[in-house]
Amino acid sequence: MVKILPITYSYIPYKNEVLERKETVQNNSYQVDVPRSFQCSFGSNFIPRFESVDLSPVLEIGDVTCPACGVKTLSEKKYNILVNEAAKIDEPADLVTFFKNNIDYIPHHMRDTLFKNADLFLKEDNLTIFDYFANSKQNAFAKRYDSFIEIKNFLFDYSKTLEDGELKDSVDKVFKVIDTTGGYQEFKDVFFPLVNRKDFDKDAKDYLILNLFKDLRANSLNFGVYNIHDFKTLPQNELSKLWAAKIFSNSLIKQNKIHSYDMDHEITNNSVLECNSCVRKAHPKVFMDFRAVESPEVAKFFLQSYLANIAKLMGEGKIIPNRHYFNNFTFYVNKLSKGSIEFSQADIDRLLSLRALSFKREEFAPIEQSVVDIPCACCGSTLLPHSRRLDIQLKLIQAENLSDYVKILEDNDKYIGVFARDFKEIFTTIYNENPSISQEEFLKEFSARAEDSLQQGVYQALFNFNDGVKYIEKNGTPEQLNLVNLVQNRLTNYISSGYFDDYNYSNLMRSVFLGIDLDSPECTKSVYVLLNDLRTVAYRSSLIMPNDKYENADKNPVFTLLFNMFKSDVATGDLLIAAKKGGKISKDNQVGLCKGCNNLKSNKSVEAWYTQVLSVRKNFRNQLRIIDNMAKEGLLEGYDDWARTIAETMYEATRGRYDLRDEF
């Protein structure tokens, strides 16, 4: 495998450089003899390989993250379905719900204007869609106006440093346009001649374009969605249709080129899929002008999401697998960003692993949607769908202070599951006690209180086990009593001596359960419950331990902490009967588990899982009921008999102890 390492380039290749390499084009393979100027941490022997990958089938599929802005793209078919659905809506509450249910397809910069004060339209019966439209339009106008004012204020301060002359006159022209017409096109006609002047300060130009103008462009595009003349004269459902069509048209999937420096020759593997909005505003030479990206971390997040979608589609066989697409795509990203966006070998390996996993396992549709909340079949926590996880992760990347993090926690409270619930309460409590606390002091205080929570979990596990020992003393056999007493003594000594202070479950098993046959008749249910309780404590400890496993971990431990807290609740599809034990790799053998419960279930048999984890009995039934109702209501295709099949599997696997067959 080609080793992709972080690199730093000081240029973007120009057409004459590409033309010099055209002689190497043979038989649909384009190999580049790396010249001296390419030498970097890739190594002088690195040769990009271009082998054809056909992305055109994805145009009929959609649902791929735009690598430039992060919106979920729409196929023409899906777009028409959404527009036709909107055409049937004549109540504002229904339209708000419709937009919320399809928020993934709405550009990020449009969401605030759509949903600001939106709850009002869910409650008030006397409001109309015209009111909702006018409210959102006013929100969009205000955001665009604020962008103009920010630019004006910056230029006003800048103009104070200038002497009278042509440069100052050019600044005054910008002021005049902002104060009079307020039009985006008119503004551009005077703004760019100003900042492109040779005597205009370079640092000021960079700040204006990379920060302030970028926001103005997005807010102007947002405001354009409300360009519907005489909207009050339209029927409400017609306004819904036109409004939805304008919004979702931005997210239509389009195929573009990664770069267009060689205009005379079509290079294979030079394709990228983007949303319609980003294709329209892209740099004429490259699909995304990485030099204009304010945050490389956000840019990389969008790129990783896009490549993960492509890897998944390759694994599912919807496009022909091609590992070289990832190598070449990341290679060019490194070049075009001049090294500010780095991809490592681990990044490539994760994509290839995702492709392999998608090949092996059928998609479990209930956990892919976000319209209906699905409880974990084990702990009952609301499963965090993949699309919501991406939204939360983006917000975490963009967060600047502790108050931002607290708001993210509060806004997404239902996605904090049982494993991280205590930590979430500790996090918000510390902040509310002292909002001005420094991040360093905050982390120290959080660590101390989280440690107390973990210790309490250990003590509770011991307390529960002691109750089990008392029961065995009254009702168990001598052999069972000897075993639980041995475990109790070993465990008490192990914990009191401080060996479990690192919550290393593997060390505990080796030290306390050495020589004990956990499959023997003497091993009672209380022992298994104890092991599950202690393993849960060990898993919870891993959520708050700083590490460099995830993006940004070394730069921001608070990001890592919250990332792990939400990650424990991410929706996963788990085989009820493991493939190694003869289980089918299909949706009819899958249930939805949060990431934490999936880790803790591991390779347990269904009978052991049902016996040792008491919460399964209630929450398993709840998940089956909800998914079965979704199938009956037409929200899920192909799941009409799923609940009945799973209930039958559960009955057989538990030898009749868990019987839900009559309910489905």
Image (cartoon, rainbow, N blue to C red):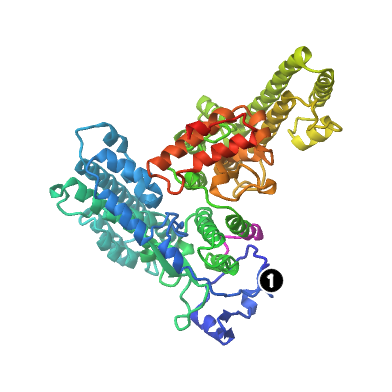
Image point (68%, 31%), residue name: 537
Q: Is residue 344 magenta?
A: yes
**Most foreground residue, 436 or 224:** 224
**In the picture provided, is 490 more to the left or to the right than 378?**
right
> For this rendering, which residue is in front, 214 or 320?
320
Which type of secondary structure does the marked residue at label 1 adopt?
loop
Q: Residue 463, position in %: x, y?
A: 71, 18
Foreground pick, 153 / 27: 27
Q: Quick check: 579 above or below 657?
A: below
Q: Position of residue 275 (x, y in %)?
A: 40, 61
Q: Residue furthest right?
A: 515
Magenta-colored stretch includes residue 392: no
Q: Which residues are magenta?
A: 339-349
Quadrant for the N terminus, please. Answer: bottom right
* Amino acid type indicated by mark 1: Gly
Q: Is residue 303 left or right of residue 491?
A: left
How many residues crowd mark 1 within 10 Å: few (<14), some (14–19), many (20+)? some
Question: What residue is shown at x 60% (from left), y 79% (from top)?
Answer: 32
Query: Residue 578 appears at what percent x and percent y?
Result: 65, 45
Q: Position of residue 152 (x, y in %)?
A: 31, 53
Residue 535 in the image: above or below residue 78: above
Is residue 217 among the parts visible in the rendering? Answer: no
103 above or below 457? below
What residue does disc 1 label?
43
The one of 653 and 307 positioned closer to us in this rendering: 653
Q: What residue do we see at 69% from left, 71% from top?
A: 43
Residue 58 can be seen, yes or no: yes
| Residue extending furthest toward the top | 474
Indicate left or right for 135 with 640 as reference: left
